Amino acid sequence: MQRVFSGIQPTGIPHLGNYLGAIRNWVTLQKDHDCLFCLVDMHSLTMLWSPEALREQTLASTACLLASGIDPTRLYNQSAVSAHARLGWIFNCVSRLGWLNRMTQFKDKAGKNRENHSAGLYVYPNLMAADILAFHATRVPVGDDQRQHLELANDIAQKFNHDMGVEFFPQIEPLIPPHAARVMSLRDGSKKMSKSDPSAQSRIILNDTADDIAQKIRKARTDAEPLPSEEAGLEGRPEARNLLTIYAAMSDRTLADVLGQFAGQGFGTFKQALADLLVETLAPVADETRRLMGDRAHLMQVLRQGAERARAVSEPIVSEAEKLVGFLR
Ligand code: TYM
């Protein structure tokens, strides 16, 4: 059975992009793969953070992932398993500055004020490679925005093997969904849906109320044309394409099929149908999240047990890597 690893930042309740790009696929994969899913709380320190908020958001993320159908025995938080930090350091010394300089996500996040960002933000992709390789995972289900990081992880694995003269770390295969791998902002079809967007109107959060969802979809940016009958008619219409892609992904239908249904109609009818579909799918997740949030002891217990299992899998692998680089034990 192939091992699957993936991670998500514990920013509280995930958004629809996280759900369609990652979480939903994790739930499917765990049926026939050996899976580990990680709340990457060490990542959370790369930008300014509040300890209290980090604790609360980690618990909220745990509740929402469980409510979305993630198997509780496979979920844990990164900082509780020392393999991540230990292999992360080794990879800091394997990875090259030239490789990190090419990472587009650092450039996007650091923006113009590069000098003032943490060193952690810069080397974070090395830690992400360690997250995966500490488990010898070979398949990594992610959204499209993580593609470059996974290429870097493969470069690091290859260089480690080459430098140490071993075949120790496997190559990783990204599992990027064919549809909705990059869900866009509801306010601007050229930006991806993200928690860092200042406008809450730009994203659907998995515990939004039915009224929130209806209002956000009603206000979502569109254009004045009716919906086309074919995909070619979405050329130059990123907002229309985004909403239709969300509809198709949420209903497990093809874009062509959805276009066939709504061709020639205005956005009014379509938006109502999309809001109804989102509410129908997400309301049970929101209800279960709320219920689970009331039982903090249970959430803590899930994370502790998940970390124990993650430790058992990663410890021999990272110990061997430490031996290979020459650390005495
Ligand atoms: P993060 O927390 O930004 O996102 C978690 C997952 O959600 C996907 N995603 C999206 N998919 C489609 N449309 C969007 N708008 C969208 N926004 C986010 C992401 O692609 C991701 O799969 N660095 C990672 C976390 C990480 C990780 C790992 C992932 C740490 N270590 C090891 C895989 C393997 C991150 O910040 O994801």
Image (tube, rainbow, N blue to C red):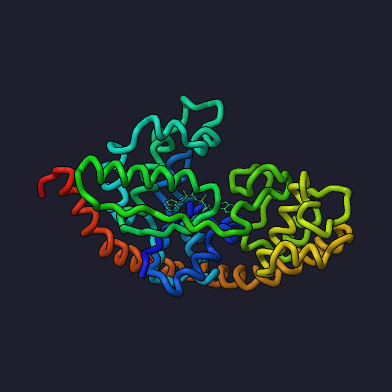
Q: Position of residue 120 (x, y in %)?
A: 39, 37
Above/below status of 101 relative to 82: above
Residue at the image point whose x is 62% and y is 62% from the top: 206
Residue at the image point whose x is 43% and y is 45% from the top: 151
Nearer to me, 253 or 310: 253
Nearer to me, 275 or 25: 25
- Note whether residue 219 is visible: yes
Q: Position of residue 45 (x, y in %)?
A: 42, 43
Quarter of the image for residue 156 reads: top left
Q: Is residue 195 left or right of residue 2?
A: right
Q: Quadrant of the N terminus?
A: bottom left
Residue at the image point whose x is 67% and y is 52% from the top: 203
Above/below status of 49 relative to 171: above
Q: Is residue 309 left or right of residue 71?
A: left
Above/below status of 101 relative to 140: above
- Note whether residue 56 is visible: no
Quarter of the image for residue 76 reads: bottom left
Residue at the image point whose x is 85% and y is 62% from the top: 263
Q: Position of residue 302 (x, y in %)?
A: 39, 69
Nearer to me, 52 or 147: 147
Q: Is residue 279 left or right of residue 45?
A: right
Q: Residue furthest left?
A: 328
Q: Position of residue 288 (x, y in %)?
A: 57, 72
Give the mark count.
0
Above/below status of 101 relative to 146: above
